[in-house]
Structure formats: C-alpha cells, structure tokens
Image (cartoon, rainbow, N blue to C red):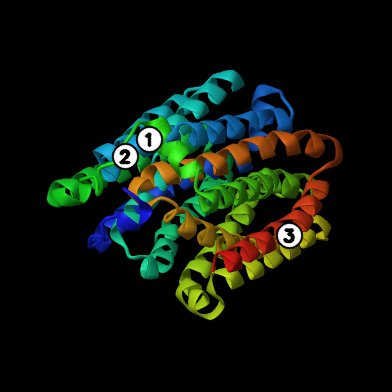
C-alpha cells in the first residue's frame, strides 16, 4: 500500500476529539511539570539544578524511544484503545513518583511514566489524521492542541503552585487523577461508539520494516530532522526558564509556575486564531513568522530587566512556537498515511530525543554561567531553522 492509496478519512466525532484533547492535556502537563520544581528537587535531594533536571531528561527520553512500540501497535490494534490503556499506565507511574524517597527513585519512576505516556499525543494526532481530511487537518489539530497547550500551561502552574503550597509530591497525585479521568472517558467513548476504536488501515510488514519504509521517503526525513532540532533547541532552553526566573528575579515557586504557564497562554492565543493565520500566511508564512518570533522572544528573555518583560517574552514564545510546530505536526500526519501511527512515532521519537539531548547539553552551561547564554543560542538558531524548513516547503511545492 502506498501513501496515495490510503483509505479516505472517516467522519471524526467532535466529542472523540475533545476527549483525546483531554488525554493530551494530561500527557503535556506531565512533560513540563518538573520545570518549576527543579529548585525544590535540588533542595530536597541536595543536588544542583542541573543534576535535578535528570527527572525531566529521562521522562523525555522514554517518551520518545518507547513511542516506537506504541505507534505500530496502534496501527495494528487501534489507536484510541492504546491511548486509553496508556492513560491508565501513566496514572500508576505518577503514583509511584509521588512515593519516591530519592532522586534516583524519582528518575526511574519518571522514566516509566514516559514509557506509558508516550503513546498519547502521537497516536491521538494519528487518529485525527485518519479521520480528518488534509484541508481541515491543520485547523483541527490546532483545536486538538488546545488540550496540549493547556496541559503545558497547567503543568507549569501545577508544578509551581501546588508544589509551593502542598509540596512536590502532591503534584503527582493530581496528575494521577487527571490520567485516570481521561482514560475512563476514552473507554466510555469507545463503548458508546465502537467503530472509532478500530484500526483504519491494515498495516503491512514488521515494525522495523514500517519504520524503514518511512525513513526512505526524503520528505519524511526532512520533517523528522527539523522537529528533532526544533525540540532539542527550544525545550533544551525552555526547561530552565523557571529556574532562571527564580535565580535572577527572586520569584517564589508559585509565581515561577504562573510565569512559565504564560507559554500556554501564548499557545491558546495561537489556537484561537489558527484558522485565520493558516488562510492568511499559509504553511511557509507560519514557519517564517514563527521562527522570527522565537528568535525575538528568546533574545528579550536573555536581556529581560525584570519579570514583567520576561512574562511577555514567554507569551510570545508560546505563539511563535506553535506557529512553527503546528505546521510540522500537520506535515508529520501526512508523511506515510498507510502507517500513520508508525510515522508519527518516528516524529515523536525525534522530538523527544532532541529534548532529551538538549536539556543535558544546556544543564552544565546553566550551572556555570546561568541561562541567558543558552537563550541567546536559541535566539540565533531557531529563526534559521524555520527559514530552512519554509524553503523546503516551497521546493516541495
């Protein structure tokens, strides 16, 4: 089966997209919940902020690597059932994180959370790709992103506020409950509409054969390389925004969480105007403006004289990041329509491995020189990367 022979999209029940967005909320919240907790964890376990960041690094690494298993499994057995089971597994791992008595134990439980949670966002996106035509897909994915962006914002705010008021362990109990609610809602939805749980296409070949088939496509390699570089650069720097706000401006943990959550506010601004931006700018314009905004915002963040200016820069980061990343996601859903789960597994792998590499590269720089040097590096690199992908889109026609 070729990309052009993929079955036409089925009708996507709006309520199913809402529930998948809730599941993405839980997964995204878990991705960023550690960021504002780094100072607390470093004090709790008597380590540096850079050393404490291993709790974020191992989660991101597992989130990327193990999606390679979930992607082909979702293609063969149904994407939505795999997402629902992943929610339950992630809930159990969050409970184990809350009970951790050492940084090593926390790192292990965070790794296991990444293993289970890694199915949620890429398979939900693949399900949208199976059920929504390409012409409507970027706008639909933007609406789906509302759960993901709210999760990123809530994760940062949750880590800051709840961690400050009730302690960092309470954060993981809240996440456990959120996962269970999302998984239960998905199981109830599939029971009411069994057809939406079925695999849309019969994937052929082994998992390795499917992955190699995707990698043989030049456009798929382009998208995968760009998302890896984007993820490594952006999240490798953004992970330390909360610690930087605390160290430079003396913000308390709750205010650090709220400031980092401003990134989600920027994401919501993008989601609310995404259909208009898609029509006005097109894919290439979204890349160019998004990359330019990222460069400007990181430069301002590096020079920010006070927390208010940093707060505004973080909002601009949210808008600009999703202008670029939503375009990458939309192209990712069409890299290999006949094995969409496997293709988006590779997409997610490169995104999360990029993050897992970016954070430890940035950590010793932050420990020695502070965060502004890595913000300047992102300010210079991300606009160039966005321009390169925009030119690749133009060459592709």
Q: Earlier in the sequence, mark 3 or mark 2?
A: 2
Q: From the image, tell me which residue sits under label 2.
A: 74
Q: Is residue 141 left or right of residue 293?
A: left
Q: Nearer the viewer, residue 111 or 160?
A: 111
Q: Residues within 10 Å of mark 2 (few under 14, many from 20)?
A: many
User: Residue lying furthest right in this view?
Assistant: 369
Q: Is residue 135 left or right of residue 360?
A: left
Residue 367's x, y, as percent?
Answer: 80, 35
Q: Disc 2 to disc 1, how far (Cα)?
A: 6 Å
Q: From the image, tell me which residue sits under label 1.
A: 70
Q: Earlier in the sequence, mark 3 or mark 1?
A: 1
**At 61% from the left edge and 51% from the top edge, which residue is drawn?**
226
Q: From the image, tell me which residue sits under label 3.
A: 384
Depicted 109 relative to depicted 32: above or below: above
Q: Nearer the viewer, residue 238 or 48?
A: 238
**Does dot 2 land on a helix, a strand or a loop?**
helix
Q: Quadrant of residue 52?
A: top right
**Does dot 3 land on a helix, a strand or a loop?**
helix
**At 33% from the left edge and 34% from the top edge, which residue is drawn?**
205
Q: Is residue 77 left or right of residue 303?
A: left
Q: Quadrant of residue 310?
A: bottom right
Q: Disc 3 to disc 2, how far (Cα)?
A: 35 Å
Q: Quadrant of the C terminus?
A: bottom right
Check if mark 3's residue and mark 2's residue have beta carbons within 8 Å.
no
Q: On residue 133, which mark appears?
A: none
Q: Disc 3 to disc 1, how far (Cα)?
A: 33 Å
Q: Residues within 10 Å of mark 3 (few under 14, many from 20)?
A: some
**Visible residue check, residue 62:** yes
Residue 234's x, y, as percent?
Answer: 66, 50
């Amino acid at each position: 089966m070729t990309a052009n022979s993929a079955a036409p999209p089925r009708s996507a029940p709006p309520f199913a997209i809402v529930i998948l967005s809730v599941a993405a909320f839980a997964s995204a919240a878990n991705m960023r919940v550690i960021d504002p907790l780094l100072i607390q964890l470093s004090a709790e376990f008597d380590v540096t902020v850079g050393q404490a960041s291993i709790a974020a690094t191992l989660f991101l690494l597992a989130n990327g690597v193990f999606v390679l298993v979930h992607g082909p499994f979702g293609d063969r057995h149904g994407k939505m059932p795999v997402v629902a089971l992943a929610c339950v597994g992630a809930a159990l791992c969050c409970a184990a994180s809350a009970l951790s008595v050492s940084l090593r134990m926390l790192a292990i439980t965070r790794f296991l959370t990444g293993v289970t949670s890694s199915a949620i966002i890429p398979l939900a996106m693949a399900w949208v790709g199976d059920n929504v035509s390409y012409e409507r897909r970027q706008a639909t994915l933007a609406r789906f992103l509302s759960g993901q962006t709210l999760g990123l914002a809530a994760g940062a705010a949750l880590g800051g506020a709840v961690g400050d008021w009730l302690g960092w362990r309470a954060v993981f109990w809240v996440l456990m409950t959120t996962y269970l609610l999302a998984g239960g809602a998905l199981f109830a939805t599939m029971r009411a509409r069994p057809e939406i749980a079925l695999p849309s296409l019969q994937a052929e070949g082994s998992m390795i054969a499917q992955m190699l088939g995707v990698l043989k496509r030049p456009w798929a390699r382009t998208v995968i390389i760009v998302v890896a570089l984007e993820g490594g650069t952006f999240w490798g720097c953004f992970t330390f925004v909360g610690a930087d706000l605390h160290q430079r401006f003396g913000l308390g943990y709750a205010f650090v969480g709220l400031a980092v959550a401003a990134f989600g506010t920027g994401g919501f601004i993008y989601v609310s105007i995404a259909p208009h931006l898609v029509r006005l700018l097109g894919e290439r314009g979204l890349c160019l403006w998004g990359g330019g905004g990222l460069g400007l915002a990181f430069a301002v963040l590096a020079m920010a004289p006070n927390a208010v200016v940093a707060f505004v820069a973080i909002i601009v980061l949210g808008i600009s990041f999703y202008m670029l990343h939503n375009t990458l996601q939309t192209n990712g859903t069409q890299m290999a329509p006949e094995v969409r789960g496997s293709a988006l597994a590779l997409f997610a792998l490169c995104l999360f491995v990029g993050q897992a590499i970016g954070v430890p590269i940035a950590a010793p720089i932050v420990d020695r020189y502070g965060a502004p040097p890595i913000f300047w590096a992102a300010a210079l690199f991300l606009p160039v990367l966005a321009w390169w992908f925009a030119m690749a889109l133009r060459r592709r026609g």
